Structure formats: structure tokens, C-alpha cells
Amino acid sequence: MVNLGEMLEVATEGFLAATIHRVKAPPPGVDRYSVPFFWSPRLDAVIDPVPLPPELKAQARGISDDPSNPMLASFGLNMLKGRMRAHPDVTERHYPELMQR
């Protein structure tokens, strides 16, 4: 499986779509093996659009406009958004000012 990340969606203006996925634990007694590899830019990196040939650019659907999951060109802010979504209890405990009510 290849999980195309949100940064590729931002860079290609939606030509490549980020993979929506959730990991499910296997039933008791069944092993699950996973070897994730994350290749990420610096946290202060801002992702510029990748110049696509006109025939591919015409196929780009645009960046997802899901209000609960905005795609941000700033890698660090996009990473923070994901961590806050995955661990709201930690965010609430240590950074309550970041939580939207």
C-alpha cells in the first residue's frame, strides 16, 4: 500500500489525492506487521505547486475542501493539524488555546 500524503495533494492541486485510511487492530491472537516510512520536509517548509503538463493539470480535481480537514501548504501546520485530530486529549491538556470550541 502506498499512502499518498496531503502534501502531494497540495503540490499537485488535487491531481494526486491523499489516501484516506484508518488502521484497524486485528482480532486477538492475530499478529499485524507494518513497516511505515515517512519522508517529510522540514516543519517550516511551504509546499509549492508542482508544474504539471496541461493534459494532467486539466485532470486535477482541486485540493479537498473538507472544512474538518483543510489541506495546508505549510508542512508544519498540516502536521500539527493531524496530530491535534489524532490526539485531542493531549492537545487539550497541553495546548488548550489551540482547541476550537
Image: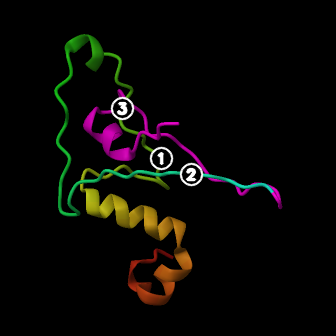
Instruction: Identify the residue shown where x is 39% and y is 26%.
Output: 61
Residue type at mark 1 is Asp
Mark 2–mark 3 Cα distance, whole angstroms, equals 27 Å
Q: Nearer the viewer, residue 66 or 80?
A: 80
Q: Main secondary structure of the magenta part?
A: loop
Q: Mark 1 sits on what residue?
A: 66
**Secondary-structure class at tag 2:** loop
Q: Earlier in the sequence, mark 1 or mark 3?
A: 3
Which numbered mark, 1 or 2, is in the foreground of this view? 2
Q: Earlier in the sequence, mark 1 or mark 2?
A: 2
Which numbered mark, 2 or 3, is in the foreground of this view? 2
Residue 25: give x, y in percent of width and height: 71, 57
**58 left or right of 92 in image:** left
**Secondary-structure class at tag 1:** loop
Image height of 67 relative to 64, above or below: below
Q: Mark 2 sits on what residue?
A: 34
Magenta residue span: 1-29
Please tell me in which quadrant of the rendered image residue 83 appears: bottom left
Q: Earlier in the sequence, mark 2 or mark 3?
A: 3
Q: Is residue 15 magenta?
A: yes
* Res. 99 mark: none
**Secondary-structure class at tag 3:** loop
Which numbered mark, 1 or 3, is in the foreground of this view? 3
Residue 3: give x, y in percent of width and height: 47, 41
Residue type at mark 3 is Gly
Residue type at mark 2 is Ser
Q: Mark 3 sits on what residue?
A: 14
Instruction: Identify the residue shown where x is 21% and y is 13%.
Output: 54
Instruction: Identify the residue shown where x is 37% and y is 67%.
Output: 80
Outermost residue on the top side: it is 55
